[in-house]
Image: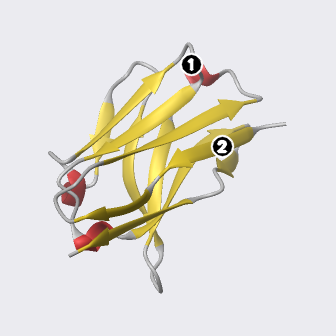
Amino acid sequence: QVLLRQSGGGLVQAGGSLRLSCRTSGINFKIHRMAWYRQAPGKERDFVAAISSDGSANYTDFVKGRFTISRDNAWNTVYLQMNSLKVEDTADYYCQTTWKGRNYWGQGTQVTVSS
């Protein structure tokens, strides 16, 4: 059974930082591309960042220079370090991976940035 269990998130003031974690089980983590998405209230789920098995990362333009995705293969965990948070970053954040053609999602973590 593939499971993605998220932790982190919460309420922070604009300019602050948060770190999200997503620990996986049921997959050979080290070979998987991992990604983070977010969904703001009333909006679609959007791509935020992804990291490949070789550690290469890519980001949506809106978070470049502020967010960092990383992975720890020893702990089967992917992280999203979010700095210089903006009110517009308020959303539910989800980690994601694909295995055998199916997308798997974490349970979601709420991030609220106050002004």
Image disc number at residue 54: none
Residue that sits furthest to the bottom in the current view: 42
Q: Secondary structure at mark 2?
A: strand
Are the residues tagged 2 and 1 within 8 Å (C-beta)?
A: no
**In the image, what residue occupies the spot 44% across and 26% down?**
71
**In the image, what residue occupies the spot 32% across and 33% down?**
57
Residue 108: quarter of image: bottom right
For disc 2, the neighbor class at 10 Å (few under 14, some 14 to 19, many from 20) is: some
From the image, state whether disc 2 or disc 1 is nearer to you. Answer: 2
Horizontal side of residue 18 vs 107, given as left or right: left
Task: Locate residue 39, reporting x and y percent.
Answer: 47, 70
Residue that sits furthest to the right in the current view: 1
Tag 1: amino acid:
Lys
Residue 26: quarter of image: top right
Q: Which residue is mark 1?
A: 30
- Compared to 115, does 17 lie above or below? above
Q: Which residue is mark 2?
A: 5
- Compared to 73, does 114 lie above or below? below
Residue 77: quarter of image: top right
Task: Locate residue 82, reporting x and y percent.
Answer: 29, 48
Q: Secondary structure at mark 1?
A: helix
Task: Locate residue 27, reporting x and y percent.
Answer: 72, 27
Q: Is residue 96 visible?
A: no
Horizontal side of residue 27 vs 73, given as left or right: right
Q: Is residue 67 visible?
A: yes
Q: Quadrant of the N terminus?
A: top right
- Compared to 103, does 57 lie above or below? above
**In the image, what residue occupies the spot 14% across and 45% down?**
65
Tag 2: amino acid:
Arg
Task: Locate residue 85, reporting x and y percent.
Answer: 23, 59
